Image (cartoon, grey):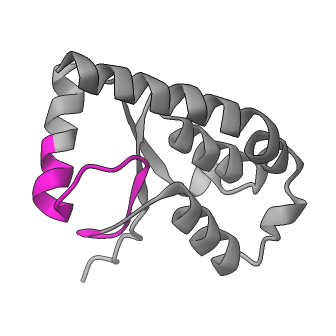
């Protein structure tokens, strides 16, 4: 009988997403990045629309980042994912210097610009 292959979680990222960057920072700084496969899509491309459609069909909404944590089982939300993998690997999230720097400094500024951009796009539609 063939040996079972170990499932490797798949991280689904949107290139322009500040929440995706936060998860990638965590995975790198925590030393977990090599435990995942990655699918990165750029917004406003056919590949992005395809991935978005699959996530909407599977989860009811497309949210980035999303991780396929087990075959056919998905989890979304950068903070939920960071908390999940920090707990599973006994990592002190607060002790990660770069993640803390991003969350406490750059991230709020980027988030403000991200939300303003989303609001402007909605006004155009």
Q: x, y percentage for residue 123?
A: 26, 21
Q: Could you tell me which residue is drawn at 14 percent across and 49 percent down?
A: 54
Question: Closer to the camera, 108 or 60?
Answer: 108
Q: Is residue 117 above or below residue 1?
A: above
Q: Is residue 58 magenta?
A: yes
- Residue 61 visible at all: yes
Q: Could you tell me which residue is drawn at 43 percent across and 49 percent down?
A: 65
Question: Closer to the camera, 6 or 60?
Answer: 60
Q: Could you tell me which residue is drawn at 54 percent across and 44 percent down?
A: 19
Res 95 → quadrant: bottom right
Q: x, y percentage for residue 85?
A: 61, 69
Q: x, y percentage for residue 44?
A: 25, 19
Q: Could you tell me which residue is drawn at 21 percent across and 40 percent down?
A: 51
Q: Is residue 22 magenta?
A: no
Q: Is residue 32 left or right of residue 51?
A: right
Quarter of the figure with the C terminus: top left
Res 30 → quadrant: bottom right
Quarter of the figure with the N terminus: bottom left
Report the magenta residues as a range: 53-73
- Residue 16 visible at all: no
Question: Closer to the camera, 23 or 32?
Answer: 23
Q: x, y percentage for residue 4?
A: 33, 77
Q: Is residue 67 above or below residue 113?
A: below
Q: Is residue 3 above or below residue 11?
A: below
């Amino acid at each position: 009988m063939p040996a079972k292959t170990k499932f490797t979680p798949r991280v689904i990222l949107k290139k322009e997403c500040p929440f995706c960057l936060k998860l990638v920072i965590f995975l790198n700084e925590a030393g977990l990045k090599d435990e995942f496969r990655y699918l990165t899509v750029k917004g406003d491309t056919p590949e992005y629309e395809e991935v978005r459609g699959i996530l909407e069909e599977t989860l009811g909404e497309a949210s980035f980042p999303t991780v396929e944590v087990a075959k056919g089982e998905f989890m979304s939300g950068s903070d939920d994912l960071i908390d999940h993998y920090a707990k599973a690997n006994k990592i002190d999230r607060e002790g990660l210097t770069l993640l803390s720097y991003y969350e406490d400094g750059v991230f709020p500024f980027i988030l403000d610009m991200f939300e303003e951009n989303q609001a402007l796009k909605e006004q155009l539609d």
